[in-house]
Amino acid sequence: MRFLFLLILLAGTGIGVVYPWAMTNFSGREIGTWRVYEQGRFKPVTVPLTGRDAPVRVLVDLTARAERIVVSQQRTVLTLTAATGGRTVLASTLQFTHSENPRQFSPQLPDKIFRDEAGLIPTVSPGPYFFTVGPGDAEGIEMRAVDLVLRSGVGEIDSRARPVGFSLMAAGLIGLLLALRFGGRRPQNPNSQPPPPRWGRGGSSN
């Protein structure tokens, strides 16, 4: 039973965590990376896109002097909008609170790189797209740099993956803990033990 619950836990981790992370960071191809914040200043960027780039996943990398980002649900670290042809095609707020394993900027520096997803542009009209990143209302975050990352031709994450994966992880973890707690060694059958030695020559007391 322990092995079965371990398999359920691993399957849930793969569906709920590894699959969305891989689809977000590795599916499709990277269009490019643009620096949108440096030395205390935000600057908008213009990126020409074509129809074959669709769908485009918009990611933001935040370099900050912190081990993790902690903000309340009512606060945001950054805001992002994307527009083309005079209309807004994406508007998002970013918190970076789910970045459990930020990348190390340099072994000699304490800065870490946190990534958050701003959203998906499902259809692309050929032409320039204007991306504007600005500060949110969260305080106390020492931002060093902010980069805009665009990936094209990405696969869309199945909305059922995370709920199903987390449910399997919970079931597998609970079952594994119960199996470890109550699945100890069974008491030995006294009849399975060899009989005690008899006294006397030849193993006989007579």
Image (cartoon, rainbow, N blue to C red):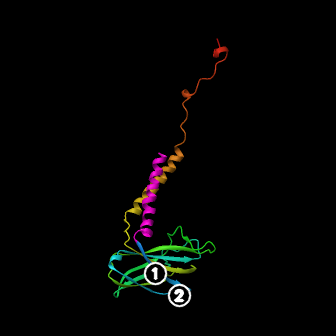
Task: Report x, y in % for residue 129.
Answer: 38, 84
The answer to whether residue 87 is left or right of residue 202 is left
- The answer to whether 80 is drawn above or below residue 5 in the figure is below
Q: What amino acid is labelled 2 in the image?
A: Arg
Q: Residues within 10 Å of mark 2 (few under 14, many from 20)?
A: few
Which residue is the extreme one toward the top?
Answer: 206
Looking at the rendered structure, the secondary structure element under dot 2 is strand
Q: Which residue is mark 2?
A: 41
Q: Nearer the viewer, residue 72 or 184?
A: 184
Q: Could you tell me which residue is drawn at 48 percent across and 87 percent down?
A: 43
Q: Which mark is residue 178?
A: none
**The C terminus is located in which quarter?**
top right
The residue drawn where x is 33% and y is 76% is 52
Location of residue 127 in the rendering, given as x and y in whole percent from the top left corner: 34, 85
Please identify the quarter of the rendering in which residue 112 is found.
bottom right
Amino acid at pointer 1: Thr
What segment is highlighted magenta in the picture? 1-28
Residue on which disc 1 sits: 79
Marks 2/1: CA distance? 14 Å
Nearest the viewer among 152 and 7 is 152
